């Protein structure tokens, strides 16, 4: 198995666990509170990265560092309109599902600016991946005609741009340094929500464990994505692939939460499996040039 694909699949599983933990947390905390407290889960990832990169900081490419930092900031900026929309209630629930289409922006930027090239099977796999993402997230086909689309555009654009910047940064600095800088940008965002949000009188031990797990697997997934990009993974391939993580979270929910799945979820999982198989096929010439 190619190195980049291994790291991508680890990211896929990490974000699948993250999504299941989000379901477990339920309404114990608000989205903003979860963002603030989950930052503690970044620590087990950031400390080893900081130790390993301590000798690189002084001589690393400034361009690479700037791209990684900008990617983290842009990703955090995408969280602000997203959480604001969530806080506005049921009317804007479609924003949550539409925001999952951010990889489409990453794909377009990678193809146009980075001039990445895909073979026919990979292109078909990406198309199937987008279909699977749609099936997992967008339950109402008429959503594209709603006003919520305009609210969803900022997180879609910002998260899509963040994915592109993650890949661009790995062209100049190591994956570990890129991940360290990218993830560090989330710390002030957590502090921002920690100061801004009113807090419940008591947070249960279980909620603490789950919310810290949220941060850990979110950070681990981001690190694995950056590692995949640094090992030759194309942004136009890696980001649609990792955003199939609902297939993992659905499987985990069936196994551990005894949930049932409908025809839509089954169709999404099948599309995701075929997409993974197609995306992993690279022609030797193009694989070598990545």
Image (tube, rainbow, N blue to C red):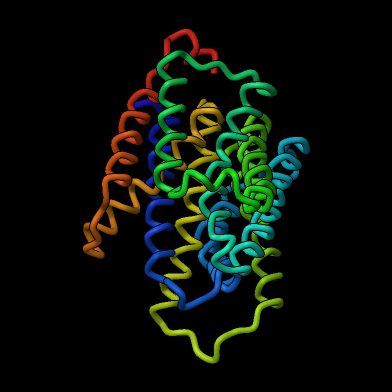
Q: Nearer the viewer, residue 212 or 137?
A: 137
Q: Nearer the viewer, residue 288 or 106?
A: 106
Q: Nearer the viewer, residue 275 or 229?
A: 275
Image-quadrant location for residue 158:
top right
Q: Residue at x 65, y 52 (%)?
A: 147
Look at the image and tell me whether residue 271 can be seen.
Answer: yes
Look at the image and tell me whether residue 181 can be seen.
Answer: no
> Eyeballing the image, is 38 above or below 166?
below
Q: Residue at x 31, y 40 (%)?
A: 269
- Pick the quarter of the image with the C terminus: top right
Q: Residue at x 40, y 17 (%)?
A: 121
Left or right, 174 with reference to 214: right
- Pick the quarter of the image with the N terminus: top left
> Eyeballing the image, is 82 above or below 157?
below
Image-quadrant location for residue 35:
bottom right
How many numbered callouts?
A: 0
Left or right, 274 with reference to 227: left
Q: Residue furthest top?
A: 285
Counting from the top left corner in percent of width and height, residue 57 is at 71, 46
Counting from the top left corner in percent of width and height, residue 26 is at 42, 71
> Eyeballing the image, is 192 above or below 243?
below
> Eyeballing the image, is 233 above or below 116?
below
Q: Nearer the viewer, residue 43 or 248?
A: 248
Q: Residue furthest bottom?
A: 201
Counting from the top left corner in percent of width and height, residue 65 is at 72, 42
Q: Residue at x 63, y 45 (%)?
A: 156
């Amino acid at each position: 198995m190619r190195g980049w694909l291994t790291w991508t699949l680890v990211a896929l599983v990490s974000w699948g666990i993250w999504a299941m933990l989000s379901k477990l947390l339920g309404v114990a905390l608000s989205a903003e509170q979860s963002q603030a407290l989950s930052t503690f889960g970044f620590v087990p990832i950031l400390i080893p990265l900081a130790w390993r990169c301590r000798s690189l900081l002084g001589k690393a490419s400034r361009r690479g560092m700037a791209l990684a930092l900008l990617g983290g900031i842009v990703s955090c900026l995408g969280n602000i309109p997203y959480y604001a929309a969530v806080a506005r209630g049921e009317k804007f629930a479609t924003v949550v599902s539409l925001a999952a289409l951010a990889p489409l922006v990453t794909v377009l930027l990678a193809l146009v600016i980075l001039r990445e090239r895909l073979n026919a099977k990979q292109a078909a796999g990406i198309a199937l991946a987008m279909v699977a993402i749609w099936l997992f997230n967008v339950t109402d086909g008429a959503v594209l005609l709603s006003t919520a689309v305009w609210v969803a555009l900022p997180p879609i654009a910002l998260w899509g741009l963040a994915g592109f910047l993650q890949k661009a940064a790995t062209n100049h600095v190591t994956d570990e340094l890129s991940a360290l800088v990218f993830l560090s940008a989330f710390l002030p965002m957590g502090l921002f929500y920690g100061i801004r949000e009113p807090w419940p009188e008591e947070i249960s031990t279980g909620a603490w464990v789950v919310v810290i797990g949220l941060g850990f697997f979110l950070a681990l997934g981001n690190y694995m994505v950056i590692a995949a990009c640094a090992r030759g993974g194309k942004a136009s391939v890696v980001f649609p692939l990792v955003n199939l993580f609902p297939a993992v979270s659905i499987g985990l929910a069936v196994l551990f939460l005894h949930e049932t799945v409908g025809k839509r979820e089954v169709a999404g999982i099948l599309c995701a499996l075929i997409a993974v198989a197609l995306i992993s096929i690279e022609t030797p010439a193009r694989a070598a040039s990545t």
